[in-house]
Image (cartoon, grey):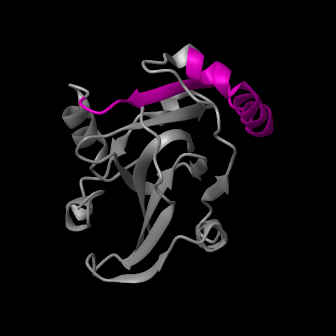
């Protein structure tokens, strides 16, 4: 994958005004503070391991073993996997569509971005938080939080995912069309 110079960025919207952000920032401390207020974990971690082209799941996990082990022991996670998409991936469109609708999970959704970027949209109360995560970002979305994820039209990212029980991560879609009203990643 190519190196990215992208910066973490957050916009907060009222859920009834999807084109008018009430806050825009790339300040990591402000992002962490705003997300902490709604129970979302956000931290910047070292993600300096260079992964070879075509790195498989085992290679990615081993490259970030100390971070994975720290999270697993700290939060009682029992399993870990990796989602990795390279530019031009043939299944990218279907994967993007799968995550673009508002849904919830029965357990926390924890992602450590080690390459590329993607956008989490968190629908909490009357607000939608768009958090564009990049290499080095750790985000933990609490179980039951309404959200969606956009990886962009031609995604390129690698994220380590941690679970207490992978079965708890199954998406439960809300049926709300709110996600279609907000700006997409790269739009």
Residue ID at (62%, 62%):
39
Q: Position of residue 117 (x, y in %)?
A: 43, 47
> Does residue 126 appear in the picture of this structure?
no
Residue 10: in magenta span:
no
Point out residue 113 in the picture as x, y percentages from the top left corner.
54, 42
Residue 77: within the magenta? yes
- Asked if residue 82 lies left or right of residue 92, the reply is right
> Where's the N terminus, which quadrant?
top left
48 left or right of 9? right
**Does 23 appear above or below 83?**
below
At x 71%, y 25%, the residue is 65
Q: What residue is at 33 percent from the left and 75 percent from the top?
A: 15
- Total labels: the figure holds 0
In the displayed structure, does residue 184 sit left or right of residue 8? left
In-front residue for pair 75/34: 34
Image location of residue 108, percent across then percent down: 57, 44
Question: Is 165 in front, or is 27?
Answer: 27
Image quadrant holding the C terminus, namely bottom left
Looking at the image, which is closer to me, 39 or 160? 160
Determine the residue positioned at 38% across, 77% down.
13
Residue 183 visible in this rendered orientation of the protein = yes
Quarter of the figure with residue 21: bottom left
Part of the protein shown in magenta: 59-88
Tell me if residue 17 comes above or below residue 133 in the rendering: below
* Horizontal and vertical percent position of residue 156: 36, 38
Residue 58: image quadrant is top right
């Amino acid at each position: 994958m190519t190196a990215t110079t992208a910066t973490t960025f957050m916009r907060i919207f009222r859920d009834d005004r999807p084109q008018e952000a009430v806050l825009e920032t790339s300040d990591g401390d402000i992002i962490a503070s705003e997300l902490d207020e709604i129970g979302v974990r956000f931290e910047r971690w070292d993600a300096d391991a260079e992964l070879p082209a075509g790195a498989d799941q085992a290679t990615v996990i081993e490259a970030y073993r100390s971070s994975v082990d720290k999270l697993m022991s700290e939060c009682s996670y029992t399993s870990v996997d990796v989602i990795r998409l390279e530019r031009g991936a043939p299944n990218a469109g279907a994967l993007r569509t799968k995550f673009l609708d508002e849904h919830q999970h029965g357990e926390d959704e924890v992602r450590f971005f080690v390459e590329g970027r993607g956008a989490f949209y968190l629908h909490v109360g009357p607000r939608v938080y768009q958090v564009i995560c990049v290499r080095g970002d750790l985000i933990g979305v609490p179980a039951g939080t309404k959200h969606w994820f956009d990886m962009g039209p031609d995604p390129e990212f690698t994220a380590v995912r941690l679970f207490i029980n992978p079965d708890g991560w199954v998406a439960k879609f809300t049926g709300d069309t709110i996600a279609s009203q907000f700006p997409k990643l790269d739009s």
